[in-house]
Each structure stands twice: as C-alpha cells, then as structure tokens.
Image (spheres, helix red, strand yellow):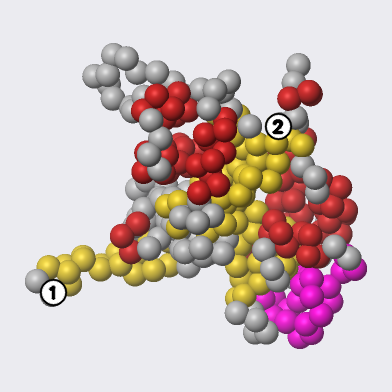
C-alpha cells in the first residue's frame, strides 16, 4: 500500500523482551544485522491494531486488516490481509554545543531507504533527491560528521563536525529526516547508536523504594520508516485512520501512562501497482 514515516514526539521504549544481565534491565528492539534501533513488525502491527480499535473501526475491518487476536483456543483464527514490515531508523537526535540537538543519519541508512523504495516498487516523488543526497553522504569520513547548515565549531556528542557539504535542497530532505541534519560515516553512526539514553525507573510501595531498574529508550524526535502491503479491501479506511495520527498521536511500545511512545505517522509513497508482476 505504501511507505510511511513515524515521527516520535516522546521518548519510546519498544522492548526487546530479552533477558539481560547487563546494568540495563530493559533494552529496546534492534536490527539483528546492524544493531540499529528498530520497531519489529509485530510491535508496530499491534500498536496500529489498538489504534484502529480506539478509532471506532468495525470488527470486520480490523479482522480483515490485522487478523484475529492470537489465541490458541480460537478455532476461527485468521491471518490479516495486510502485511507489515519492520520500521527502520531514518534519523535520531544527537546532542550539540550549538543547538539543542541535530538529527543524525548516515549513508547506510539512506542506501537502505532507497533500496526499500526500489524493492517494493514504491512511487516516491523525491527519489532523485535522495539519490543525490546519498552521493554526498557516502563521502563523509570517519570522525568528521557533517552538519547541513551554516554553523561553525559544531560538536556532536564527542565528534567535531566538519563544514557542511554543498547540497542545495536541504529543506526538501528535512521534510523526511527532520530539521538540523547531521550526516555521520557508517562506522561512527554504528558506534554511537550503541549507547541510547538510559532512564532509571522506580517502583514505590507506601512511599518506599522497592525496585529500581534501568530502561533504554529511543529519544524523542527520532524517525523511522516502514512499508505496508495492503489487501484488496478497506484501503480507504486504512488511509483515513492513519491520517488521524497527525491530530491524535498513536502510542507505540510500553509505558503509555507516563507518556512514552507517542508518535505521528505520515504516508510518503505509494506502491506502484503497474510494476507488479
């Protein structure tokens, strides 16, 4: 059906569910190949299903799109007719001495984004824009990230930024990655996303601390992208519900009661039906 971008407006914790013996008790989901933060398709599908339920869609529509609820005793279990893929990282905030933050990305992420567009035959109006951008991003060297603005003397985390490369269509790229873009080498990006923010959580019983644990989060203002392949029916209803997230954000992952995981979703590309075999 199309390509979508998730814009996280609050910190997000989509837990991996793995047992950890590290100092961090609860870690976020990560891609098995790159170790970048990711939202698994099952978690994304579950969040969307819950949003559809609260939006008042009929059981028939919800079951057709998402399938029946998982239940071993449910003999009438059916698989959803829409296919959801992992939401991959597009940009993530990094601290700076000049601005509150820049949005970091790297050549590998942009290459994967373009590969997704090509592999799923997505009609994307700014494909050529990203093809030009990747040529510049691939030139970024280790230990020398580039900021796409006129600021000088920028420090990003522990990296001293180089002068921005010449790219005239920054505003167009910012529509997707967000404002204040910084491009890192693949090696540097992979290194710093190993260490996401850690938040201490505490359980109180009668005002007394009983259980302190540490939770990893994807910081607010991060962006992800994902693909949905639609079934034959209810595409208009699906589109209309997704549009509602721009006014009433969807909640993805854990800790909804403390404001984690609230995000907007925007459709940015369509599957080109004419190229299907």
What is the crowding at mark 2: few (fewer than 14 residues within 10 Å), some, or many (at least 20)?
many
In the drawing, does residue 30 fall left or right of residue 161?
A: left
Q: Quadrant of residue 57?
A: top left
For mark 1, what is the residue?
A: 208
Quadrant of the frame with the C terminus: top right
Image: 127 above or below 24: above
Report the residue that reaches farthest toward the top. 75
Provide residue 78's location: percent of width, then percent of height.
40, 18
In the drawing, does residue 111 fall left or right of residue 40?
A: right
Image: 174 above or below 19: below
Which span is picked out in magenta? 145-167
Quadrant of the frame with the N terminus: top right
Residue 158 covered by magenta stretch: yes
What is the crowding at mark 1: few (fewer than 14 residues within 10 Å), some, or many (at least 20)?
few
Q: Please state which of the two labelled residues, at mark 2 or mark 1, is closer to the viewer.
A: 2
Q: Residue at x 67, y 63 (%)?
A: 178
Task: Give the camera-side residue of 168 and 270.
Answer: 270
Q: Is residue 99 visible?
A: yes
Q: Is residue 196 visible?
A: no
Among the two numbered marks 2 and 1 on one chain, the one whose residue lies closer to the N terminus: 1
Provide residue 259's location: percent of width, then percent of height.
38, 63
Task: Give the camera-side residue of 67 and 160.
Answer: 67
Q: Residue at x 43, y 67 (%)?
A: 198
Residue 216 covered by magenta stretch: no
Task: Give the camera-side residue of 205 and 170.
Answer: 170
Look at the magenta stretch and give its main secondary structure: loop
Provide residue 9's location: percent of width, then percent of height.
51, 63
Label 2 SS: strand
Distance from Cα at disc 2 to Cα at disc 1: 54 Å
> Which disc is residue 271 wearing?
2
Provide residue 169's location: percent of width, then percent of height.
85, 62
Q: Quadrant of residue 185?
A: bottom right
């Amino acid at each position: 059906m199309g390509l979508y971008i998730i814009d996280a407006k609050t910190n997000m914790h989509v837990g991996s569910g793995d047992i950890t013996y590290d100092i961090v008790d609860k870690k976020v989901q990560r891609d098995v190949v790159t170790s970048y933060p990711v939202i698994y398709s099952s978690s994304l599908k579950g969040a969307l299903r819950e949003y559809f339920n609260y939006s008042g869609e009929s059981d028939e529509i919800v079951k057709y799109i998402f399938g029946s609820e998982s239940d071993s005793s449910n003999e009438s279990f059916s698989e959803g007719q829409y296919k959801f893929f992992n939401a991959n990282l597009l940009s993530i905030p990094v601290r700076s001495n000049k601005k509150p933050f820049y949005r970091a990305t790297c050549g590998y992420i942009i290459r994967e984004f373009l590969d997704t567009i090509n592999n799923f035959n997505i009609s994307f109006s700014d494909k050529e824009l990203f093809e030009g951008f990747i040529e510049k991003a691939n030139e970024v060297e280790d230990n020398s990230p580039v900021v796409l603005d006129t600021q000088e003397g920028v420090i990003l985390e522990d990296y001293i930024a180089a002068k921005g490369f010449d790219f005239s269509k920054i505003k167009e790229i910012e529509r997707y990655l967000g404002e204040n873009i910084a491009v890192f080498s693949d090696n540097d990006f992979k290194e710093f996303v190993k260490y996401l923010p850690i938040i201490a959580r505490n359980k109180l019983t009668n005002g007394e601390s009983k259980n302190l644990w540490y939770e990893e989060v994807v910081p607010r203002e991060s962006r992800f992208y994902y693909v949905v392949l639609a079934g034959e029916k209810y595409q208009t209803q699906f589109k209309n519900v997704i549009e509602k997230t721009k006014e009433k954000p969807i909640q993805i992952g854990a800790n909804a009661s403390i404001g984690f995981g609230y995000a907007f979703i925007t459709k940015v590309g369509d599957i080109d039906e004419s190229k299907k075999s």
